[in-house]
Amino acid sequence: MSYGARNRITAKVTSVKSDEIMSLVKFEVAAPHLMASVLTTESVEAMSLKVGDEVELVIKAIHVLPVKQ
């Protein structure tokens, strides 16, 4: 799959907090630094994101987009 964003960081999911509509997913990146992404709960469920998953973060403008490999 192709993405318009060029900045990519490998990260580990450290927490997932969900309600009916939105989810907050936090990540640990290699440095170690922490990043977070707010996305719909539907997206979290579609990717089956859970603590400990390895993902690639695609960063574009103000958005952090997790991509599960």
Image (cartoon, grey):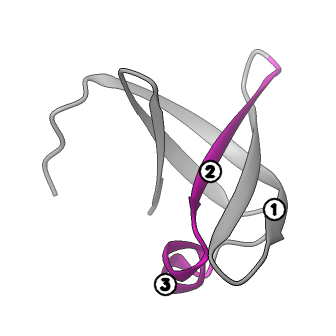
Residue sitting nearer the eye, 10 or 63:
63
Point out the stretch of residues depicted in magenta. 32-48
Whichever of labels 1 and 2 marks the residue nearer the N terminus, that label is 2
User: Is residue 38 shown to the viewer in this render?
Assistant: yes
Residue occupying image coordinates x 61% and y 76% = 41
Residue occupying image coordinates x 52% and y 82% = 42
User: Is residue 51 shown to the viewer in this render?
Assistant: no
Determine which of the numbered discs, if any, sits on residue 69 in the image.
none
Residue occupying image coordinates x 76% and y 15% = 31
Alpha carbon distance from label 1 to label 2: 18 Å
Q: Secondary structure at mark 3?
A: helix
Q: Looking at the picture, how far across and down is residue 65, in whole percent?
A: 45, 46
Alpha carbon distance from label 3 to label 2: 15 Å
Residue at the spot of label 3: 46
Quadrant assignment for the N terminus: bottom left
Residue at the spot of label 1: 52
Q: Is residue 38 above or below residue 64?
A: below
- Give the number of the mark in front: 3 or 2: 2
Q: Please say if the residues under marks 1 and 2 sit with CB atoms less than 8 Å apart.
A: no
Residue occupying image coordinates x 72% and y 24% = 30
